[in-house]
Image (tube, grey):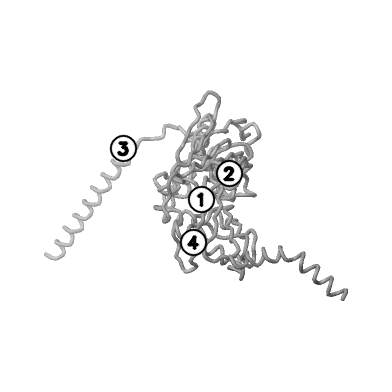
């Protein structure tokens, strides 16, 4: 009887709990706002204007690119233009003869005399009318031909039309020097001057000093300046150059591979010979085959055309075992002439033969008659 009463009590408690839960649920449902008959708009919202995301620009610059950051665009340059995430405005273009680019949507854009960064900024500004936050990158694919003048201490001074047929990539000072045959041994590579005309009407011309000795000594590639159309490169004459400096400069990439000197007189193979720059006098004599049996082996004469147009003559005592020395075994320069005289015995023999040749001729005639 007691157990039956307990079960009845539990059942009633469960039923009351269920009613309480249902009442709270109904109240919560009743508090949900109705739609009031408004149907959702089935048309999706219009797409916003084209707005490409800007790529992360915190990546360090490529050192190779920074070397050429002052390159200015000119006629004939072929470039790749990329408008980020807008492929229909991207592509390859060529700078026209009037120094402009013809681009989709924005038309003609003058770029002559602008660096690649400046041209990118100018084109970005023009596309801003049609594209939100435009990000333009320009890559130089092929440089057009440029006119360069070079004067001073180079093998072949003059004017040059520089294109990728002569120089691969963007031309620099050292590449133009190589195109002109390399420097002479009188070149002052510490004070190379680049005269640059004004890029635009009303602008100012520039004179830029380049120290190629720093390029050789420390590898400072910023000294190898990128040249522009209309530049003039002037290589001055060195006032003093130590043998160590001369040797290091002679091995530079912008020095000629060989120079021509003349060895004449009593050597096995007289004439013009090609030798490396700064070849000592003794080595040049050996390159000409060495002394012949008639040579005066004690001394030779060195004839040199100086940069100021004068001619110097110097008699030098010869010791083929002598190491390179500015006085006893000096380094030769392009177009030097080494004269090897006859020995005294050879000179006497030649003179006697010349004097006696008529008498010997008569003797031979008489011998033939009698």
Residue identifier under label 4: 317
Query: Horizontal and vertical percent for residue 126?
Result: 54, 30
Quarter of the image where one finds residue 56: top left
Residue identifier under label 1: 185
Nearer the observer: mark 4 or 3; the answer is 4
Tag shown at residue 80? 2
Q: Residues within 10 Å of mark 4 (few under 14, many from 20)?
A: some
Closest to the observer: 226 or 242? Answer: 242
Q: Residues within 10 Å of mark 2 (few under 14, many from 20)?
A: some
Query: Horizontal and vertical percent for residue 218?
Result: 39, 52
Mark 2 vs 4, N-terminal side? 2
Give the answer, above or below, for where 40 lies relative to 163. above
| Quadrant of the image containing the C terminus | bottom right
Quarter of the image where one finds residue 289: bottom right
Mark 1 vs 3, N-terminal side? 3
Nearer the observer: mark 1 or 2; the answer is 1
**Residue at 45% across / 32% down in the picture?**
37
- SS of the residue under disc 3: loop
Between the C-alphas of marks 4 and 1, the distance is: 23 Å
Q: Residues within 10 Å of mark 1 (few under 14, many from 20)?
A: many
Query: Horizontal and vertical percent for residue 249?
Result: 47, 53
Residue identifier under label 3: 31
Give the answer, above or below, for where 343 lies relative to 130. below
Between the C-alphas of marks 1 and 2, the distance is: 42 Å
Between the C-alphas of marks 1 and 3, the distance is: 99 Å
Asked whether the viewer can see residue 46, the reply is no
Nearer the observer: mark 3 or 2; the answer is 2
Closest to the observer: 135 or 204? Answer: 204
Query: Horizontal and vertical percent for residue 258?
Result: 57, 57
């Amino acid at each position: 009887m007691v157990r039956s009463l307990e079960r009845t009590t539990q059942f009633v408690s469960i039923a009351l709990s269920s009613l309480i839960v249902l009442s709270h649920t109904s109240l919560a449902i009743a508090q949900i706002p109705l739609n009031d008959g408004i149907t959702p708009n089935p048309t999706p919202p219009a797409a916003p204007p084209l707005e490409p995301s800007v790529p992360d620009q915190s990546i360090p610059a490529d050192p190779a690119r920074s070397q050429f950051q002052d390159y200015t665009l000119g006629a004939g340059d072929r470039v790749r233009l990329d408008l980020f995430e807008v492929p229909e405005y991207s592509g390859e273009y060529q700078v026209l003869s009037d120094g402009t680019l013809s681009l989709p949507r924005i038309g003609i854009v003058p770029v002559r005399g602008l660096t690649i960064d400046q041209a990118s900024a100018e084109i970005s500004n023009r596309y801003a009318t049609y594209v939100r936050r435009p990000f333009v990158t320009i890559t130089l694919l092929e440089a057009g031909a440029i006119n360069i003048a070079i004067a001073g201490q180079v093998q072949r001074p003059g004017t040059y039309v520089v294109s990728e047929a002569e120089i691969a990539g963007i031309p620099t000072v050292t590449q133009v020097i190589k195109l002109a045959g390399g420097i002479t041994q009188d070149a002052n590579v510490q004070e190379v001057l680049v005269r640059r005309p004004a890029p635009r009407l009303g602008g100012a011309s520039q004179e830029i000093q380049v120290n190629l000795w720093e390029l050789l000594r420390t590898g400072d590639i910023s000294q190898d300046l990128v040249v522009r159309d209309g530049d003039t490169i002037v290589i001055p004459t060195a006032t003093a150059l130590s043998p160590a400096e001369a040797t290091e400069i002679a091995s530079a990439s912008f020095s000629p591979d060989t120079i021509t000197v003349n060895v004449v007189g009593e050597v096995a193979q007289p004439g013009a010979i090609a030798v490396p720059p700064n070849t000592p006098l003794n080595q040049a004599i050996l390159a000409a085959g060495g002394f012949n049996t008639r040579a005066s082996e004690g001394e030779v004469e060195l004839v040199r055309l100086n940069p100021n147009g004068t001619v110097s003559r110097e008699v030098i005592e010869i010791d083929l075992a002598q190491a390179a020395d500015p006085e006893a075994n000096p380094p030769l320069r392009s177009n030097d002439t080494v004269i090897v005289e006859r020995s005294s015995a050879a000179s006497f023999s030649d003179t006697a033969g010349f004097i006696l040749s008529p008498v010997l001729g008569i003797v031979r005639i008489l011998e033939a008659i009698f």
